[in-house]
Amino acid sequence: MEQTLQNIRDYVETTREDAMDIDNPPHVDMEERLNETLKYLHERVRNQQAELEKLRSESSSNALQTPSSNPRERLKQLKTIKTAYNQLTPSKPDLPTPSSLLPVLLATRTIQETIMTSKSTIPTTHSTLSKTLSLLAREESDLADTTAISTALTARLTRLRVASSTQSLQSPTDLAREALRGKQSLHRHLERETTALRNAFIAFVDAHLAPLLAAEELGGPVVGELADVDDDVLSAGFSAQGRPAKQRRAGGDAEAKAEEKRQRRIDEIWGPAATAGEGEQMSEKEAAAAELHGLVEDLFNALLGGLGSGGGSYVMLERDSAAARFLVRSRIAVFHPKDAMKLRLVDFGRTVDE
């Protein structure tokens, strides 16, 4: 074995001393060296095949093929193998000549295989990296949420401990008085918030929603299909196709008749509710706003148990109005499953009726 290693070292030293310039060799010289290498390899193949045929022809019938079950025969086989190994070990390995291009070709093939393997693993590595980064981002988000929850719980526990230690030093009368003050403060806060929300709702209905509801009542498009509707459009009305009618400018008796027709139409749709205080007639916008305000108030009262028509929290409708349809489309209210003239607010603590 030591002799084999020494032969390899000698070969490396020989090739190093006689280094070949393989970066930019002349074309003709490269072809000649390739042909020589190819001839050398063919010759080696022929020699090996000849030696193999010679060994086959000289081998006896009881040549080593499988281990013998007889211990003595098995020992003889091992000795034969050992003798062959000892005879072949000192022999000099058959290495290519220093001028051969075989080492260069073998190195080139190995490099190409390495490059192809690396290229094939790039997409897999990229996909794995993307999945890992996505998982890392998700884990970081979960960690941030967990940290926030832990911080909030810790602060809550601290407040509870402080409150518990404080209450343990107070008398029952003081605790009751403090609880009453807290309820009263919460009640005042809720009243302020309710008033602010009510005022905002009234302002939104009067400024934006009422004209759209009036347009739908007059045969125009449903709420949401028109961005804005002014008083002139409501006064002119809508065609049978739901389009705004042409606005005609008239004076004298014609204008008075048009106004009378308009008020008659308002009375037919909205009824006595379209009359404001002191007998003053409302416009379409004002009538629609008053109807929606009244309907929402009735629904709230019914939900709280103040009003109703014997149907629980349902309100009995006088007619199929655009205001009622809008509340249903907005999922604010629902019709009775068996009576479309009954309406109630959605109890958001329960499941919405389909």
Image (cartoon, rainbow, N blue to C red):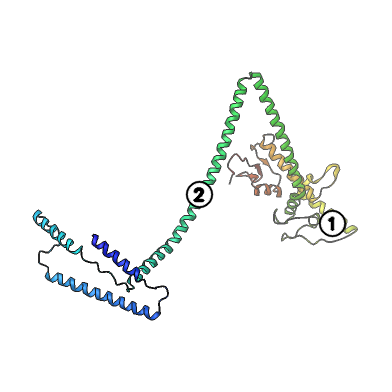
Q: Residue 38 in the image: state x and y as whole percent.
A: 30, 76
Q: Residue 57 in the image: state x and y as whole percent.
A: 13, 71
Q: Residue at x 38, y 81 (%)?
A: 28
| Labels in figure, total | 2
Q: Is residue 52 left or right of residue 140?
A: left
Residue 41 got which mark? none
Residue 34, quarter of picture = bottom left
Quick one: SS at disc 2? helix
Q: Is residue 113 left or right of residue 169?
A: left
Amino acid type at mark 2: Leu
Which residue, given by chain and number where applicable, does mark 1 sit on? Answer: 258
Q: Does residue 309 show up?
A: no
Quick one: SS at disc 1? helix
Q: Residue 122 in the image: state x and y as whole percent.
A: 45, 61
Amino acid type at mark 1: Ala
Q: Nearer the viewer, residue 160 or 39?
A: 39
Residue reaching furthest to the bottom:
28
